Image (cartoon, grey):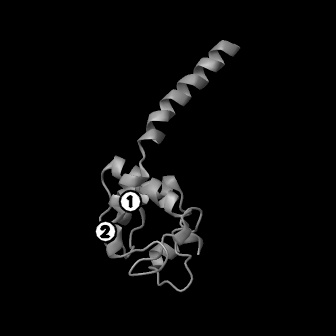
Amino acid sequence: MKLRQRVLAVMLALGAAAPASAAADARRGEQVYKRCLACHALAYDRVGPRHCGLFGRRAASVFGFGYSAAMRHSKIVWNARTLDQFLTDPKKMVPGTTMTYDGVRDRTERADLIAYLKQAGQSAECRR
């Protein structure tokens, strides 16, 4: 492939990726996260486990939290892709999960929520 073709391919790839990453808005995601507060919190466990330290963490690994067998055996490592899949339909991704929430069906809301969780994971609340 000629240099000019490679440069064009890279430019097109970057241009195609920009709208997807630009669309995620952590501020809007914080509003979506309010739905999660019925069961979760950032820095402490509730009915569901805490979300601080979520990215890169293996599912069912918060010490002392009582996870379902399904979640303990899932071998999921939380990242943007696995969160997107799980949040789309938790019961489909992990049959037998005790999470009763049906998921976030709207793609934009999921992207915003994931952006918020990533940003919140770096917050002072999560560094304590």
Of 117 and 3, nearer the camera is 117
The image quarter in which residue 79 lies = bottom right
Of 110 and 123, nearer the camera is 123
Which residue does the image show at 64% across and 19% down from the upper left? 7
Mark 1 neighbour density, 10 Å: few (under 14) some (14–19) many (20 or more)? many
Task: Inspect this view and state whether residue 1 appears.
Answer: no
Residue 12, how many percent across, how many down?
53, 23
- Above or below, 10 against 63 in this view is above
Which element is circle 2 on?
loop
Q: Quadrant of the N terminus?
A: top right
Residue 17, how many percent across, how many down?
50, 34
- Above or below, 98 against 7 in this view is below
Q: Which mark is residue 30?
A: 1
Q: Which mark is residue 38?
A: none
Give, as a three-letter code, the residue at label 2: Tyr
Q: Which mark is residue 101?
A: 2
Give, as a three-letter code, the residue at label 1: Glu
Position of 31 with respect to 66 (left or right) is: left
Task: Inspect this view and state whether residue 23 appears.
Answer: yes
Q: Quadrant of the C terminus?
A: bottom right
| First of labels 1, 2 by sequence position | 1
Mark 2 neighbour density, 10 Å: few (under 14) some (14–19) many (20 or more)? few
Which residue does the image show at 36% across and 63% down from the upper left? 33
Of 31 and 20, nearer the camera is 31
Residue 13, how many percent across, how many down?
55, 28
Which residue does the image show at 45% across and 74% down from the upper left? 70
Which element is circle 1 on?
helix
Residue 51, how many percent across, how many down?
48, 70
